[in-house]
């Protein structure tokens, strides 16, 4: 179906007499967007940068120097990481915090010693494991600096301290806890300010300053030759200019990609009035101020294709139906941001509105291919406009004073290969994981195991999960990490 601008459905039928040519600006749809905005105040405009959430999310807390206590446990030598963190805060913020105040911060060396001792059950906070003191670590937890996470840093720390004190009273050991927000270190920076201000409060905690960083890599089982995944990175100095610059570069690239993508589709179809503000505002496209969201080009492709198809459908459908169809699509993307057009039907949508106009979607896909992660035709290396490439990530963290520890985050999609593919196919995946390990400069030593402690929408039997974990352990020699703290009840 070919639509010329002069014959655009935006000017005929249901929308022919509307004040605005954009179907989203019809009275009914505008009211729906406004209602949705009031219910979801986090979905505000790109330029607003979430000013209305400033108090809820919290700016990085920068206390006055006199709010810090005297040197805590000064007789004990400080670790190199604690010393580096204290020096970074002094240089960046002008605040002097004794390095000994960061005694509870675990270093990469300490993390390497503890990982071989931890097993799947240590991360699962079942009633039995809590009662027996088996649940002793959480190595994957996010604050509300991460998309879809709600707890503030203060709330998480208070709950962790409460459990750590009980755990220490029962076992004499300290509870190990890692902060791993997605593609941002703002939250863990605040954690360190809180620790430095009152170190005695955290005496029964061993805190790991961390990060869950997205990265692009080649994938042996992918039809398009690549995938985007997450890497857990432990034992970092979140004030390191090397790390913050690397993250800032990624965030800037994502913002530019969004703006450029929208600009290019508007050149093709100005009558559709694609908008950066609109894509940010959509229910399925909620951003924090830092754009710490991976796979954005997939979401923008879905937005541009869907809006184009809905505009064409405006010839025969009323505004409320169009809006509801669009919202269902975007809500689906919110539940699973890795979805592509070909997977939408797997989420149970009974109305197919994507890919109905070949011309529109073919041209949008050409733009998508420019910005999405792909293999360079000449070098055959993975390149990405808006994601970190694996080799670049390894180079960045190799330049830290003490190289951090890395773990493959949530590799549960590999377990689907394990269940559905033959052994030879899954062996390719394992070989790929070993390749990542071999090319990590010694930093990748663990993977995030699957356990009932996770809130996973996987529908895999426990037997499959256990076989998957065992297979990975035996064939990659990676240690296990995991997290269950969200299930811990007060």
Image (spheres, rainbow, N blue to C red):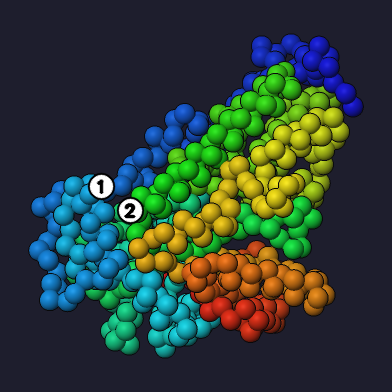
Check the image and name the residue furthest to the right. 1
Please, which residue is most extreme toward the front here? Answer: 378
Eyeballing the image, is 126 above or below 362?
below
Does residue 224 lie above or below 434 as drawn? Answer: above
Task: Please state the horizontal and vertical placement of residue 113, each as a whole percent of the image.
Answer: 40, 81
Relative vertical location of residue 67 with respect to residue 160 in this rendering, above or below: above
- Dot 2 lies on which element? loop
**Spot occupied by residue 65 in the image (x, y as percentages of width and height):** 13, 51
In the displayed structure, 400 sits above or below 31; it is below
Q: Residues within 10 Å of mark 2 (few under 14, many from 20)?
A: many
Residue depicted at 80% across the width and 48% down the height: 342
**Is residue 32 visible to the viewer in this orientation of the structure?**
no
Along the viewing direction, whichever of 122 and 371 lies nearer the viewer:
371
Q: Quadrant of residue 424?
A: bottom right
x%, y% of residue 230? Answer: 56, 59
- Figure quadrant of residue 1: top right
Most foreground residue, 15 or 442: 442
Considering the numbered disc 1 on the image, is that residue within a helix, a strand or a loop?
helix
Q: Is residue 458 left or right of residue 175?
A: right
Neighbour tally class for label 1: few under 14, some 14-19, many 20 plus, Cα within 10 Å = few
Quadrant location of residue 110? bottom left
Residue at left offset 64%, top offset 32%: 261
- First-in-chain label (1 vs 2): 1
Q: Are marks 1 and 2 in contact (CB under 8 Å)?
A: yes
Residue at label 1? Answer: 92
Q: Which mark is residue 239?
A: 2
């Amino acid at each position: 179906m070919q639509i010329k601008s002069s014959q655009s459905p935006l000017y005929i039928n249901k929308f022919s007499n509307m004040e605005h040519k954009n179907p989203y600006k019809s009275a009914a749809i505008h009211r729906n967007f406004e209602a949705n905005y009031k219910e979801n105040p986090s979905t505000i405009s790109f330029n607003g940068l979430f000013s209305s959430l400033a108090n809820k999310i919290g700016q990085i807390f920068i206390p006055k120097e006199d709010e810090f206590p005297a040197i805590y446990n000064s007789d004990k030598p400080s670790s190199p990481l604690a010393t580096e963190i204290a020096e970074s805060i002094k240089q960046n913020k002008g605040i002097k915090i004794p390095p000994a105040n960061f005694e509870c911060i675990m270093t990469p060396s300490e993390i390497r010693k503890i990982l071989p001792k931890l097993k799947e059950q240590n991360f699962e906070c079942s009633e039995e494991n809590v009662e027996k003191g088996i649940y002793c670590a959480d190595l994957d937890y996010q604050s509300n600096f991460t998309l879809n996470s709600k707890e503030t840093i203060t709330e998480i720390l208070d709950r962790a301290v409460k459990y750590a004190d009980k755990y220490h009273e029962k076992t004499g050991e300290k509870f190990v806890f890692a902060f791993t927000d997605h593609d941002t270190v703002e939250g863990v920076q605040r954690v360190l300010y809180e620790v430095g201000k009152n170190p005695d409060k955290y005496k029964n905690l061993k805190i790991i300053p961390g990060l869950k960083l997205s990265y692009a890599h080649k994938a042996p089982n992918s039809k398009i030759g690549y995938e985007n995944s997450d890497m857990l990175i432990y034992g970092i100095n979140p004030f390191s200019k090397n790390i913050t610059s690397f993250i800032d570069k990624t965030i800037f690239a994502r913002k530019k990609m969004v703006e450029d993508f929208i600009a290019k589709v508007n050149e093709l179809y100005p009558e559709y009035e694609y908008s950066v503000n609109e894509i940010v505002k959509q229910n399925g496209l909620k951003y924090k101020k830092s754009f710490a969201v991976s796979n954005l080009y997939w979401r923008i492709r879905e937005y541009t294709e869907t809006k184009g198809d809905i505009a064409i459908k405006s010839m025969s459908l009323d505004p409320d139906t169009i809006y509801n169809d669009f919202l269902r699509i975007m809500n689906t993307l919110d539940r699973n941001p890795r979805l592509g057009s070909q997977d939408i039907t797997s989420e149970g949508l009974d109305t197919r509105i994507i890919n109905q106009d070949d011309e529109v979607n073919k041209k949008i896909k050409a733009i998508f291919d420019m910005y999405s992660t792909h293999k360079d035709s000449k070098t055959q290396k993975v390149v990405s406009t808006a994601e970190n490439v694996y080799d670049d990530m390894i180079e960045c963290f190799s330049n830290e004073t003490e190289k951090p520890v890395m773990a493959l985050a949530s590799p549960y999609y590999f377990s689907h290969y394990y269940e559905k593919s033959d052994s030879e196919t899954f062996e390719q995946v394992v070989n790929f994981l070993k390749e990542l390990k071999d090319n990590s400069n010694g930093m990748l030593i663990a993977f995030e195991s699957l356990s009932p402690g996770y809130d996973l929408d996987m529908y895999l039997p426990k037997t499959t999960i256990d076989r998957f974990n065992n297979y990975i352990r035996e064939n990659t020699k990676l240690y296990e990490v995991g997290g269950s703290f969200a299930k811990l009840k007060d």
